[in-house]
Image (spheres, helix red, strand yellow):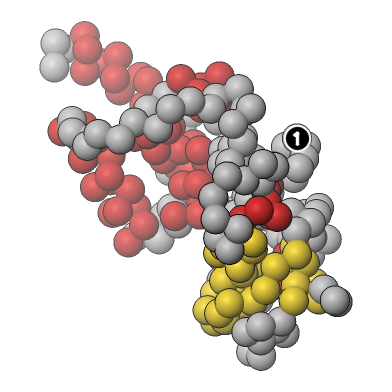
Amino acid sequence: MTTNPEQRGLHDMGGDPDHRWSGPVPRGEHVLAPWEKEVDAIRTILGRKGLQTADELRLGIERLPGEDYARLSYYERWFRSIVYTMELKGILRPGQLAAKLAELKARGA
Amino acid sequence: MSARFRPGDAVRVTAERPAISVGRPHIRTPHYVRGQRGTVAEVMGPFRNPEGLAAGEDGLPKQVLYRVRFPQPQLWRGYAGPAGDTLEVEIYEHWLEPAHA
């Protein structure tokens, strides 16, 4: 068992009851919010267009800062990974998304 | 491409990230089977290497993927289930080396 991040990703916590993020597994069904379905749809389109493989999605999640990984929900992690990959590939400029969100907010959208 | 191992072969999962791993770290081999000895249960065939795909590369050369079977009591300290329980994990060939009895 290793804790070197080059050897063990922060997601690799399976079977480790002493892991700092270990806890009970929720057994209930997950009701998805509309935005979560949208994130899923965007990821599917990016995959089909060859802009983000499932493996790139994984890496983008695994490279989240640890405190974000622990705090964010499943599809929040997906969304962060999508933005990470798009910025890495120059499809989104850094800050472009935040600027657009601020613009929409100012418009009252 | 030919598979290095066959069903029934004894294999050991490398403890450290293999030298021929590609890309930035995207590691699918769980920590709890590193360095563990298991048996090849099934040869799944060659697939593009996810370590390279994750880094935006083409994932070539392809790596043969195996399902490797481990005895549960060997993996977990104080395993409380039946002694004959096994766990199967999908592992790529570059993470495996031959194990001798």
Marks counted in the figure total 1
Which residue is at 22% across, 12% downward?
A105
Name above or below for residue A39 compared with residue B46: above
Residue B35 placement, left or right of B30: right
Residue B8 placement, left or right of B100: left
Q: Is residue B53 visible?
A: no
Q: Position of residue A18 (x, y in %)?
A: 64, 27
Which residue is label 1 attached to? Answer: A3
Q: Quadrant of the C terminus of chain A?
A: top left
Q: Position of residue A31 (x, y in %)?
A: 18, 33
Name above or below for residue B10 compared with residue A88: below
Judge by depth and name the residue closer to the eye, A102 or A56: A56
Secondary structure found at label 1: loop
Judge by depth and name the residue closer to the eye, B29 or B47: B29
Judge by depth and name the residue closer to the eye, A77 or B101: B101
Q: Is residue A107 visible?
A: yes
Q: Quadrant of residue B20?
A: bottom right
* Residue at the farthest right position: B100
Which residue is at 37% across, 27% downward?
A73
Q: Quadrant of residue A97?
A: top left
Judge by depth and name the residue closer to the eye, A63 or A22: A22
Subunit ID for the residue under disc 1: A
Which residue is at 40% across, 61% downward?
A50
* Residue at the farthest bottom position: B2
Q: Position of residue B80 (x, y in %)?
A: 57, 45
> Which residue type does callout 1 highlight?
Thr
Q: Quadrant of the N terminus of chain A?
A: top right
Q: Residues within 10 Å of mark 1 (few under 14, many from 20)?
A: few
Which residue is at 60% across, 22% downward?
A20
Q: Position of residue A39 (x, y in %)?
A: 28, 39
